Amino acid sequence: FVRYYVTIQQDASSSNNNEEEQLLMEKSMSDMTPGERALARFFMADQNRKNKTFKFIPVVVDGPWAARYAVTGKPVIIGNKLPVQYIYVPHDPINGMAEYLECDLDCAHSSMMARNIVMLCKSCTSVLTLDFAFLVEGTKEDELPEHLMGAMRIYRLDPDHSPMFPVEDDLDETEEEEFWDCQSTN
């Protein structure tokens, strides 16, 4: 993914070194691909900048005509349409945690159009095949061409029969094994 990047924390007292820090950051990204460079800048950005560059591409691959018409596959800067919360967790080998970035999209408290699309798709998810792609918009010449950060397919999800994931702290090891054994038989 991103091989190496320098995280620079800025406060009011560090504004003198801004040019120096910028040069250090650019040098650390000189061997990266355009996609890695865009992703590194995304990881180091503040909430506002992330909202302006996090791109989402939804596609209805198979399903009712109304859902295919409503979800066109057109890329959207999701932070302009929905509230997004970004949660970054660094690598923690002691506790066996991998580094990850979570982006929580709040569809319930969004625009009327987004809520209507979600409600339309929710009513027919058991017959939908959805593809979602995520990427960081390249806003500088050295970040182009854009590269996908990730993609996923949801095939005929039936929310009424989908299991609720337990909170990890609520299960002991035996109960967790039983939960996953039960899911593999369904």
Image: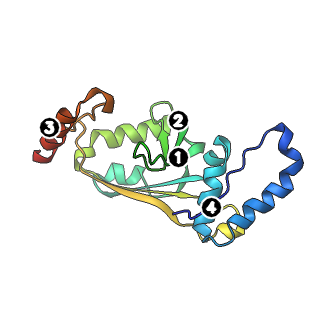
Q: CA distance from mark 3 to mark 1?
A: 30 Å
Which disc number belongs to residue 38?
4
**Closer to the eye: label 2 or 4:** 4
Q: Nearer the viewer, mark 3 or mark 2?
A: 3
Which quadrant holds the C terminus?
Answer: top left
Instruction: Identify the residue shown where x is 31% and y is 33%.
Output: 168
Q: Amino acid at mark 4?
A: Ala
- The residue that appears at 85% across and 56% down in the rendered structure is 19
Kindly identify which residue carries mark 3: 178
Q: Looking at this rendering, what residue extends furthest in the right direction? A: 16
Task: Looking at the image, tell me whether mark 4 or mark 3 is earlier in sequence order.
Answer: 4
Q: Secondary structure at mark 4?
A: helix
Count residues near mark 4 (Cα–Cα under 10 Å), then give few for <14, some for 14-19, many for 20+.
many
Mark 2 lies on a secondary structure that is: loop
Disc 1 marks a residue whose amino acid type is: Pro
Q: Nearer the viewer, mark 4 or mark 3?
A: 3
Q: Which residue is mark 1?
A: 90
Inspect this view and state whether residue 137 appears.
no
CB contact under 8 Å: marks 2 and 4: no
Of residues 22 and 105, the one drawn nearer to the viewer in this rendering: 22
